[in-house]
Image (cartoon, coloured by chain):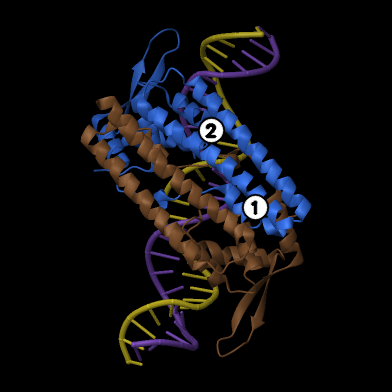
Chain colours: A brown, B blue, C yellow, D purple
Amino acid sequence: MTKVSELEASVLGQVWKHGPCTAYSVRKHFLESPTSRFSGSAGAIYPLVSRLEARGLLRSREVGRGRRPGKKLEVTPSGRAALRRWVEAPLGGEESGTYDPLRAKMVFLGSLSPAKRRRWLEEAERALAAHLKRLEAHREAYAGETDPYFEIASWNALDQARSRIRWIRRAKARLTAATR
Amino acid sequence: MTKVSELEASVLGQVWKHGPCTAYSVRKHFLESPTSRFSGSAGAIYPLVSRLEARGLLRSREVGRGRRPGKKLEVTPSGRAALRRWVEAPLGGEESGTYDPLRAKMVFLGSLSPAKRRRWLEEAERALAAHLKRLEAHREAYAGETDPYFEIASWNALDQARSRIRWIRRAKARLTAATR
DNA sequence: CCGCTCATGTAACTGGTTACATGATTTA
DNA sequence: TAAATCATGTAACCAGTTACATGAGCGG
């Protein structure tokens, strides 16, 4: 009945989905993901994997295939159970909210001069467009993925990005309207 | 030319916007906000305020008004400058992405049984609807606020919430379609 | 053979949270 | 007068990041 943290569950889930794999490949997944909240820092992953092994949620197999033998991770039955429990755990109030760093800055946009404000809005729109492109590229890279849940999850990221772009545009409209 | 962290900037901005006020009132703002990423824990706020005072970004005045004299905080000119710098700082790649805890769980929804999956989707939709209600109530509570930036920022939170509800509905549609 | 990626790890640091402690003032 | 809120603070803890270190195998 062990509970796992979000990062722990993400690692567990990653190993569960992508077969026996190395800790490094899990790490790389985080490093490349444009949507994860975790950086995939080695200092987080490796100690965490050790802990999961110690708790019997992961096990490592010496797979001596080819010339480069590697320690491949696998999820144990209790690991799968822990993952399931994490997924279906009742959502706390914090989980139902999202945090947007641009929103946090928007609140204080009034502290800038009108010229700087305009610049900020342009720059924000540009950054969001670039981010959307990154998301689309990342999606492209995983075109072979047939798992519907992965697909649905990626909808969320795309929705969010598009919604934020519309938001910035509306902000611009609202603010120029006020000046006129 | 001191740089401030996000929490520091938020405190600075809060004091800047809501006149001379106590550290406690700033803290309460975080405690009540349904959208902030910070909990407003005392252990974060008070040491942080002291640091900002030491760095000359905040100053405290003994305002002996009424029966309850209090230490009221004010933003110094360098504090305002630091806030401005934080707002207009170029957005890093991490800032252009948002993180959604529901999305993280969605990726591994396939680990649940079909029945549990359906339950999860229902529960998620319910939680998101409740969150939207909280946002609307919070907005209502600040109806007197005339600042356009506050208003625009709150659009973002509402957009995001509605967009997530549509997302869950689409997910349900997609998944029931697959079963049929 | 040089540089890149694979692969694993650790130590120091950072920053926020939890939990606790205290006391004054207001409201029921 | 008891409970709630205002108000300030601190110490222990935790989790993730940064930066560093090491070595093996592979491609140009």
In the rendered image of this protein, does residue C25 appear above or below residue B118?
above
Q: Amino acid at mark 1?
A: Arg
Subunit ID for the residue under disc 2: B
User: Foreground residue, B13 or D18?
Assistant: B13
Percent of width and height locating residue B21: 39, 21
Give SS at disc 2: loop
The answer to whether residue B8 shows anywhere in this view is no
Percent of width and height locating residue A177: 30, 28
Label 1 and label 2: CA atoms lie apart by 30 Å
In the rendered image of this protein, does residue B161 appear above or below residue B176?
above
Give SS at disc 1: helix
Residue located at (41% from left, 59% from top) = A134
Percent of width and height locating residue A45: 55, 64
Lateral position of residue B117 relative to residue B20, left or right: right
In the rendered image of this protein, does residue A149 appear above or below residue B149?
below
The tag on residue A174 is none
The answer to whether residue A82 shows anywhere in this view is yes
Say which quadrant the N terminus of chain A sits in.
bottom right
Which is more foreground, mark 1 or mark 2?
1
Say which quadrant the C terminus of chain A sits in.
top left
Subunit ID for the residue under disc 1: B
The tag on residue B34 is 2
Q: Amino acid at mark 2?
A: Pro
Residue located at (61% from left, 47% from top) = B170
User: Foreground residue, B159 or B66?
Assistant: B159
The tag on residue B174 is 1
Are labels 1 and 2 assigned to the same chain? yes
Label 1 crowding class (10 Å Cα cut-off): few <14, some 14-19, many 20+?
some
Count of numbered marks: 2
